[in-house]
Image (cartoon, rainbow, N blue to C red):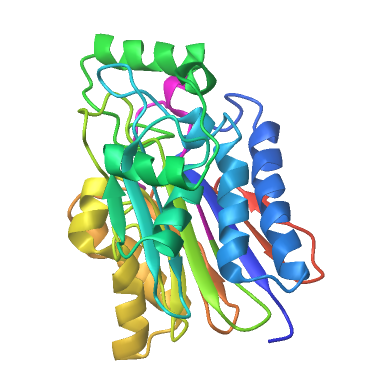
Amino acid sequence: MSEYVIAVHGGAGTISPGQVDVTPYHEGLKAALQAGGDVLRRGGSALDAVQAAVQSLEDCPLFNAGRGSVYTSDERHEMDASIMDGQCRKVGAVAGVHGVRNPVALARAVMDHTQHVLLVGDGALKVAREQGLATEDAAYFHTEERLAQLHRVRAQGRGAMALDHTGQAIVGANPAPICEDSKYGTVGAVALDLAGHLAAAVSTGGMTNKHPGRVGDSPIVGAGIYANDASCAVACTGTGEQFMRACVGHDVHARMAYQGDSLESAAHAAVFGDLLAMGGSGGLIAVDHRGHVSMPFNSLGMYRGVLRSNEPAQTFIFQ
């Protein structure tokens, strides 16, 4: 390969146009692209690049991952993350963790330093301690805006909010005006490096007001994440229960591998097919082994961006 490419997302759904200043969101996405792009530019691996990009987004309080994670119904933070190497299809994932500054780094540690794929709760935190990963107290993850968001959702009797950026976001569903409570998002990254290898990473704080112990699609291989050098790398965002039921990440790969679909065709079918039929809202970012990028979504918007060799970063929110 003579070129590299990296794409990132900051969650599905979106605030209404003109509702708030979206400049900080674009800046956050560009910072993540730059972090991952710097790795690729130096000849680094796609795996290292997606980790760097996701860690950048985890450190930004605007997005629902790491420092910006939303609250569970018992006013705690429970974070999920995963990372997958398309070259050998190794995976590391964690679920229901707290206190770890960068959950995606813990997912990478599970991949590199254990014989397992997915660790949860205290077992995952034991690996964090053993590997000397950065930890923070609860105050680091706390923001008044997130706590107020939880209280408003409770007061409205809405249950867990299915999307980070909007409660009603499916295209064509005649959605109600979007409230300020719901402008935060799950994060993910996919990349193709100069050696021709693919990788994907995802991180999330989950759903506002979620039941303690709830795990979404983000740490589930084939649902919220998938990477295979023979086809593509995929990072999903949206209503996790439906993404798990539709196996969206692997569905994109399968359509390419077994039907010969292009990346664009496979990604579009995955987002607007079974997922939409079962009421799933959201989208995905994907890159194939030739460097093509697809970023379809069936929600009102998706915070996303792409960076290619020798080109400026591009970021988008709406269609």
Q: Is residue 228 magenta?
A: no
| Residue 120 x/y as whole percent | 27, 44
The quarter holding residue 19 reads top right
Quadrant location, the N terminus: bottom right
Q: What segment is highlighted magenta in the picture? A: 170-189
| Residue 15 x/y as whole percent | 50, 31
Q: Residue at x 82, y 70 (%)?
A: 310
Image: 279 above or below 37: above
Image: 313 above or below 55: below
Q: In the visual, does 315 lie left or right of 81?
A: right
Q: Nearer the viewer, residue 209 or 297?
A: 209
Q: Nearer the viewer, residue 113 or 201?
A: 113
Res 292 seen here: yes
Q: Is residue 188 magenta?
A: yes
| Residue 101 x/y as whole percent | 52, 35
Q: In the visual, does 92 lie left or right of 62?
A: left
Res 12 seen here: no
Q: Nearer the viewer, residue 207 or 273?
A: 207
Which residue is outermost to the front? 130
Q: Residue at x 57, y 59 (%)?
A: 50
Q: Main secondary structure of the magenta part?
A: loop
